[in-house]
Image: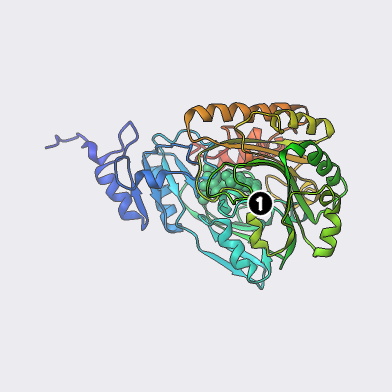
Amino acid sequence: MTAPGQVRPEETVNITGTIAGRDLEALRAAVAGQVFVPGEAGYDQTRQAWNLAVDARPAVVVAAESASDVAQAVRYARAHGMRIAPQGTGHGAAPLEPLDGAMLLRTTRMRQVRIDPATRTARAEAGTEWQDVTVPAAEHGLAGLAGSSPNVGVTGYTLGGGLGWLARRYGLAANSVTAAEIVTPDGDLVRADAGHEPDLFWAVRGGGGVGVVVALEMRLYPVRELYAGDLFFPIQRAAEVLHAWREWTAAVPDEITSMGHLLRLPPLPGVPEPLRGRAFAVVEAAYLGDAGAGAELIQPLRRLGPEMDTFAMIPPAALGQLNMDPTQPVPGEGDGALLADFPSAAVDALIAVAGPDADTPVASVEVRHLGGALARPDPEGGAQPSIDASYLLYAVGATPTPDLAGSVRAHVQAIKDALAPWHAGYDYYDFKDTPATAAAVLPPASVRRLQEITAAYDPERVVISAHPA
Ligand SMILES: Cc1cc2nc3c(=O)[nH]c(=O)nc-3n(C[C@H](O)[C@H](O)[C@H](O)COP(=O)(O)OP(=O)(O)OC[C@H]3O[C@@H](n4cnc5c(N)ncnc54)[C@H](O)[C@@H]3O)c2cc1C
């Protein structure tokens, strides 16, 4: 029996941020998707990010099925004073603040994709993985600006810029977005494009966005096949290979995007036999052109005599295999840095901390070649109109135990520190895997505009951003 004026605890959001009773029922009735609170079967599975090292414990998890679910969830969270963390795959969950008391709004089930070959565009719902776009687009001889992994989410990747195998020719994925459907922090569903909601449209293209995205529309490019592959060398040859690759990048056309990669593969059955348990220096590249011209372009690297050479004409959907990214969820610690330059001394510095003689738990150290279209400011572009850096470093290792996590973190930091003399003014948004504000990952003018837009649309910072303004 409840006395007049007394609020029954099960009807309220209590101060520890758990929801129960009628409140929970109201949320469940409002959405078609599923809702879980701590202790319920399904909570742990639904809150789990792709990066298994992340252990967020939100007050409630909503697995949205539709734009309407997203809007209902946002309105519910607003009405109950909760903050909201939108998430697709959870590949980018590491930099997030703790989600205690918050709503984790998962879009994993929103994976509808529409390819329009006539306009060369795709519309992808917020939970779409890149392979959901690249595979059907390839049937029409088209390619989207996917990154190295087929399982990374289109939305998080694109909101943070999106650097893939066609980047030097077509720029960041963010700047190929033609429209975004967004639930504003007030719970209204709006369309942002060149003619509507210019601020939201700008912020979604590389600034992490404001509000919750329910779908993105983007340009696709005519690419039926391209010449791409990997040259594998034993890691003992890392210095020779990285120096040669670095010199080679100085004169390649925009049609080639490439990386130099130090790779230490675990002795696990899932790794193909010739690579299992071994360490390599790898040059990976994708060339928008035919095999004859491509072979001529990579000849200076091929002449070094790789142990394995996988270059061939491939459909763009197969680019997802080039970098050998893990396709299953793993616990990991990583971090990246934009490099203003990568001169010979930087190669030596990198070899000293991650080369054949380094005793390191870091599995993968990539140096990606930027420039080309990435360096030319897109006058119609968004929060990252260009990238004012020539190379991009990213180092990551698996962390199956807490002990290993500390060790990997320290080694990743040591690799970043070794290249500190060549760091650009800020880091790359999507490779910033540690907590950091927008000022750490965007040019200063973009940070200022993002702060103004956030203040106008989300003054209480209801939506939790990977890198808040
Ligand atoms: C194996 C691997 C390979 C990668 N390769 C590349 C690469 O080649 N190039 C590159 O640029 N990056 C790459 N990344 C980095 C990747 O782009 C980021 O981790 C990105 O955040 C992943 O997006 P997601 O949607 O999959 O992740 P999520 O963790 O689901 O989302 C990341 C963040 O995006 C925002 N977000 C997601 N969905 C929404 C939404 N619906 N509305 C509003 N905000 C939203 C949120 O802030 C969220 O925290 C890679 C990462 C991994 C783990």
261 or 109, which lies in front? 261
Q: Is residue 304 above or below residue 460?
A: below
Of all residues shown, which one is farthest toward the left? 1
Q: Residue at x 78, y 31 (%)?
A: 422
Measured as percent of width and height from the top left, residue 100 is found at 40, 34
| Residue 291 appears in view | yes
Residue 309 image-quadrant placement? bottom right
Residue where numbered disc 1 is placed: 174
Q: Is residue 232 left or right of residue 207?
A: right
Of all residues shown, which one is farthest toward the bottom? 118
| Residue 185 appears in view | no
Q: Secondary structure at mark 1?
A: helix
The crowd level at tag 1 (other Cα within 10 Å; few <14, some 14-19, many 20+) is many
Query: Which image quarter is the C terminus in?
Result: top right
Measured as percent of width and height from the top left, residue 83 is found at 44, 39
Measured as percent of width and height from the top left, residue 170 is found at 74, 56
Q: Is residue 146 left or right of residue 228?
A: left
Looking at the rendered structure, the kind of residue marked 1 is: Ala
Cβ of mark 1 under 8 A from ligand 1: no
Q: Is residue 31 above or below residue 330?
A: below
Query: Which image quarter is the N terminus in?
Result: top left
71 or 188, which lies in front? 71
Measured as percent of width and height from the top left, residue 190 is found at 53, 56
Q: Residue at x 64, y 67 (%)?
A: 138
Q: Is residue 29 left or right of residue 451?
A: left
